[in-house]
Amino acid sequence: MHNLLMNSKVLVFDLDGTLYDGTEHYDYYAKLLTNEISLEKRDSFLKDYKKIKDYDHALTIGKIYDSENDLIISLDPITLKPIQVFTWEGQLLSKDELPENYLEKINYELPYIPVGDGWWIPLVASYHYGARDVYHCYDRTKEYMATKEFNIPYIRGLKEALEKVKDSKKLVLLTNSDREDVTRLLKLLNLNDLFHLEITDGKKPLETENHFKNIMNKFNVMPHEIVSIGDNFINEISPALKLGMHGVYITNQTTIQVSDSLLVVKKLEEVFE
């Protein structure tokens, strides 16, 4: 196990995109969203979805999408303050081209959509092409993930690694998924009864800092003794670094290096080797 985790007392894990792998469920979601888009725009939607997945588009994980003005906002990786604004086609806009005080108004609530992880990519692309009120597509994707047709992509060695450290460290699950979904997924992953604390319906990123502070109090630890592990920079990593915690960020963009307190990996398996 990596030293960053060995030297810590509390490990805080996200669930979706962290404790299991793969993108099949995102693709299934995109397929359902295609039906919410007018016929003549469907091809363009699917092409853009693929481009975003391949990091060949202005929109990437870690940015914010303004669904009202159809703009893409880049954030400073530590402060998460908006720093640049792009059109959907990737053209950088100057401050003169933006509405007055535009950057100060950006937040995490509609019409702004933080693209935190893979779930948001198909949704935001569908919004660009005119889809709205599509929560039923997300629900149907979650239902599909509960069927035998869906092969959940396990992370090799994860269960064994967590069992090995369970007695010496506190293991926490912090997720936005609801209790029913979490119980089902943990059972499917064979990870039930491994966590000392499970926080569901976590309302990340708005409540992330509060959750981290409560975890520190509950287990009586300092910020540098906690590691936050996840695939969503906005939800799990930035708030942790801001509080002085360590982070493990799971991403294909492995060139990111914003802090000595952050370990960037392509797959969670790398941490346990």
Image (cartoon, grey):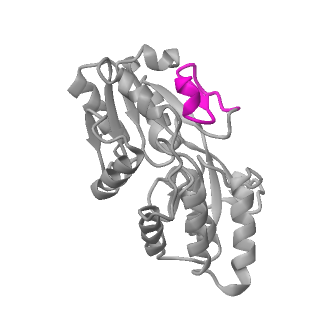
Q: Residue at x 52, y 39 (%)?
A: 155
* Left or right: 150, with 187 as reference point: right
- Residue 254 in the image: above or below residue 151: above
**Residue stretch in magenta:** 255-273
Residue 155 visible within the image: yes
The residue lying toward the viewer, choosing from 155 and 140, is 155
The residue located at (77%, 53%) in the rendering is: 56
In the image, residue 224 lies in the stretch drawn in magenta = no
Looking at this rendering, what residue extends furthest in the front direction?
Answer: 148
**Relative height, residue 143 to residue 191 (above, below):** below
Q: Is residue 133 left or right of residue 266?
A: left
Question: Can you give x and y, in whole percent of width and height, for residue 4 in the image?
Answer: 49, 18
How many marks can you see?
A: 0
Residue 217 or residue 165, whichever sits in front: 165
Compared to residue 22, the image places residue 236 above or below, namely above
Establish if 234 lies above or below 176: above
Q: Position of residue 86 (x, y in %)?
A: 71, 56
Screen quadrant of the C terminus: top right
Q: Residue at x 76, y 53 (%)?
A: 92
Residue sitting at x 28%, y 26%: 216
Q: Is residue 78 visible?
A: no
Report whether 102 appears left or right of 44.
Answer: left
State the image coordinates of residue 183 (x, y, percent, origin top left).
30, 51
Is 260 magenta? The answer is: yes
Name the residue at the bottom extreme.
39
